[in-house]
């Protein structure tokens, strides 16, 4: 017997939230038409996101919108909530539309228990959507992984254990692993 699954599009997903079927307490995201429960946020994860938020706001003041754990729309069937996204500035701060790949300078996932999911499921999805640069902050071994040059469902440029890096969009600004973890 083969199970039949039903895929949801982003409009149906939003309708479920509007009608109360899904609530903010549910902590879910839409990935390839499936509603996926997100892992609880631990203290180390929350602290790292807060530290990165403060650091990025300081480094990129008035150059970007730093979006923390908000949705982005990749296509009609995927609306993940990355930990941090550096967005192109807009006067309405994305009130009139959910950010899409062309609005994104840099996407950052902070991962501990979700490291394999972020690497094996979300990263290929980001590459397929042509997000130009993704960083994974690996809390398990205190490393930074950098992915650039999306091609199909992978990134041509992949760097592990990065000690310092400048985002593609801002080559004049360097961040170090110590900035992230200190």
Image (cartoon, rainbow, N blue to C red):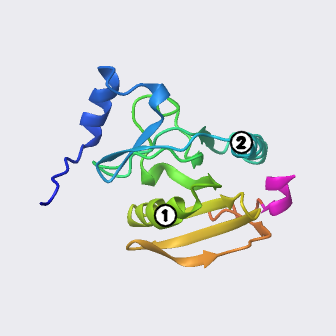
State the residue at coordinates (54%, 47%). Answer: 82
Near mark 1 (Cα within 10 A), the count class, few <14, some 14-19 or many ≥20, is many
Instruction: Tell me the tag on residue 11.
Output: none
**Labels 2 and 1 touching (C-beta < 8 A):** no
Q: Specify which label sits upstream in the sequence, 2 or 1.
A: 2
State the residue at coordinates (30%, 35%). Answer: 13
> Horizontal and vertical percent for residue 105?
56, 55
> Can you identify the residue that label 2 sits on?
53
> Horizontal and vertical percent for residue 81?
49, 44
Q: Quadrant of residue 172?
A: bottom right
Describe residue 7's horizontal placement relative to residue 17 as left or right: left
Q: Nearer the viewer, residue 45 or 67?
A: 45
State the residue at coordinates (12%, 60%). Answer: 1
**Image vertical order of residue 64 relative to residue 21, above or below:** below
Near mark 2 (Cα within 10 A), the count class, few <14, some 14-19 or many ≥20, is many
> Horizontal and vertical percent for residue 173?
76, 59
Which span of residues is magenta-colored? 174-182
Q: Quadrant of residue 174?
A: bottom right
> Horizontal and vertical percent for residue 22?
36, 28
Q: Residue furthest top?
A: 19
State the residue at coordinates (56%, 71%). Answer: 148
**Image vertical order of residue 28 relative to residue 140, above or below:** above
> Can you identify the residue that label 1 sits on?
123
Can you tell which of label 2 and label 1 is closer to the viewer? 1
For the image, the number of numbered tags is 2
Is residue 177 one of those drawn in magenta?
yes
Q: Secondary structure at mark 2?
A: helix
């Amino acid at each position: 017997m083969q199970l039949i699954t039903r895929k949801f599009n982003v409009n149906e997903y939003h309708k479920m939230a509007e009608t109360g079927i899904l609530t903010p307490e549910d902590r879910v995201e839409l990935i390839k038409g499936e509603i996926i429960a997100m892992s609880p946020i631990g203290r180390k994860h929350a602290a790292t996101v807060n530290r990165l938020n403060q650091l990025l706001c300081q480094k990129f003041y008035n150059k970007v919108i730093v979006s923390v754990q908000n949705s982005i729309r990749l296509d009609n069937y995927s609306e993940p909530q990355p930990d941090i996204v550096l967005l192109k500035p807009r006067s309405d701060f994305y009130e009139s539309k959910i950010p899409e790949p062309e609005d994104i300078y840099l996407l950052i996932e902070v991962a501990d228990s979700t490291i394999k999911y972020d690497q094996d499921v979300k990263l290929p999805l980001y590459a397929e959507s042509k997000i130009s640069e993704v960083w994974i902050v690996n809390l398990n071994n205190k490393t930074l992984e950098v992915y650039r040059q999306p091609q199909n469902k992978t990134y041509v440029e992949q760097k592990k254990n990065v000690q310092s890096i400048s985002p593609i969009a801002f080559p004049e600004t360097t961040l170090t692993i110590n900035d992230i973890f200190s």
